[in-house]
Image (cartoon, grey):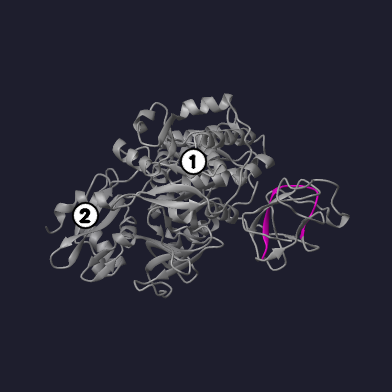
Amino acid sequence: MAELKPGSRWASQVCTTEVIVVRSPGGDVDLECGGSTMVPPGEGGPNGSPDAAASEGSQLGKRYVDGDDALEILCTKPGDGSLGVGGTLLGLKEAKPLPASD
Amino acid sequence: MMLLEMAAGGFADRVAVGTRDSGLTFAELFERSGAIAGRLRSVDAGHLVLADVSSEALPALLFGASWAGVPFVPLNYRLADAELRTLAGRVSPALAVAEPGAAGRLDGIDGVETVDRAVLWAELATALSADHDWAFDGEDVAVLLFTSGTTGDPKAAVLRQRHLVSYILGSVEFGSAGEEEAALVSVPPYHVAGIAAVLSNAFAGRRLLQLPTFEPNAWIDLVRAEGVTSAMVVPTMLARIVEHLDAEGPGSPGLPTLRALSYGGGRMPQPVVERALELLPDTRFVNAYGLTETSSTVALLGPDEHRAAVASDDPAVRRRLASAGRPMPGIEVSIRDEAGAEAPVGEAGDIWLRGEQVSGEYREQGSRLTDDGWFPTNDGGWLDDEGYLFVTGRIDDVIVKGGQNISPGEIEEVLLRHPAVADAAAIGLPDHEWGERIVVAVATHAGVEASAEELCALVRRELRSNRTPDHVEFVDDLPYGDTGKLLRRVLREQLAHLGDA
């Protein structure tokens, strides 16, 4: 469990996934990847492999949100583990295509 | 920086900047940016100043500064030496990168080390440091942009990492560009759109092409030679591109690769857009409205809205071609009266903006945001009943005649509909009786004429009679700055003799 400050970076302990926090509900959140708690980059892993229940993988550049959109994270490095919070997998945020303006 | 690392991870071998054959790949851009970060750290530079045109080094300099946690400060290289040196001195200590051959312009400023861009670039190619250590702090200042400022010293607008990252994440889907896509940028690095273009296109995975000095033939040639798929221009550029395409006649090959063309950064004469839509039937047009202080675009009129407006018989829908479209996701727009109260739909007032990409902060003057996060832009405008935003111009430019506030933009819009009128500007000049009188400067197309009476009658018919110009002055052309902004202050000086002393 850790406080997820917007802009903070987290790494999976069981795969190559790394994320950055875009929006956070505040307070302690148990951010997981592949079923294991995520840690600051360079502080553990990757060792082992993701849980079978959390092995769909993460996709580079995609944003993931919890049920009520209070938490939003951006995948900055992809891996084999799925992202979740407290045992529940996060959903992929729908992209709203916008025409390029610059 | 995070954006670039993702791009380098996602499409390392794609060309990030330059021509198809000899451009820099995303992997190479990443290495060069790291090397620039190492250089900045080694000299303990507090800022990275750029006094240079757009070049292949620009993305690496922007990302390298961010990597080292140092603000990137692009300056207007067209300023006179004394002004340029004053601005560089304001952000000392700094490493200043100068246009090749022009490093002498910034020599001898206390705390500023100057390096020639070509020399720096050659060094980086051979002496790459592998310093891949970076941190992300949303509060770090990413970019300082000096706003032109019509009065007093230029103010330095502060854009923090969180503003730019919010803008990119809110408007660009990572890796959304196809491998064949290329974006042509012809605005300079000291324009917020020049910065936004580097970030947006890198995050989308789109190759960036640069035209350091805009010239319509060179622009058209580059689009054709490099298969450019999208481009951003300021209104004066589009007007000249349209002129050149027109001059090619019916045999013109057009611009078949150009899928998207966005314009913004000033008022756009409606006839130019209409003609551009005809000449480029397969191109998707976007009108973007934004300010330096809002990390570029906050509202846009999309491609389908352009075509719908042109095709409509309903004047309210057709008029939207002159609008800035609707707010981007995450941006709130509110029109306020002079007391700061929300104005009713359809009524003009000050445009206030709120959103995560909105900075509204200046280096010396601090934040201009209200307690509840609104940024009063000082741009006048109004919203129609479907939320389309019409921008009428700077509040400071409003003409006050006999106690009535008159927006120059609405008079200009009407004048530009006259077939003989190529360009028009309305200004207020001192008047003993009315406070200010309405003077319009009009440039006509070559070989056609319009009488002052005829133009005044047109305005009287389309708008209220108190909008009728008191004087029409015919001129060869109007004064523009190099990023396409009409210089009303210069025009007021040129026409000062037409006002009461």
Q: Give the range drawn in magenta.
A: A70-84
**Which residue is rendered at x = 63% and y = 45% of the image?**
B177
The quarter of the picture where the C terminus of chain B appears is bottom left
Say which mark, if any, is on residue B451: 2
Q: In which quarter of the image is the N terminus of chain B?
A: top right
Q: Can you tell which of label 1 and label 2 is closer to the viewer?
A: 1
The disc, 1 or 2, on the residue closer to the chain's N-terminal end is: 1
Q: In the current view of this chain or complex, which residue is farthest to the right?
A: A52
**Foreground residue among B278 and A3:** A3
Q: Using the image, determine if residue A76 lies above or below residue B367.
A: above
Q: Distance between the residues labelled 1 and 2?
A: 39 Å
Q: Which residue has dot 1 on it?
A: B185
| Left or right: B249 as drawn, with respect to A25 | left
Report the front residue among B404 and B455: B404
- Provide the secondary structure element on which disc 1 rests: strand
Q: Where is residue B80 in the image (x, y as percent from the top left)?
A: 30, 37
Residue A74: within the magenta? yes
Q: Residue B368 placed where, x, y %? A: 41, 62
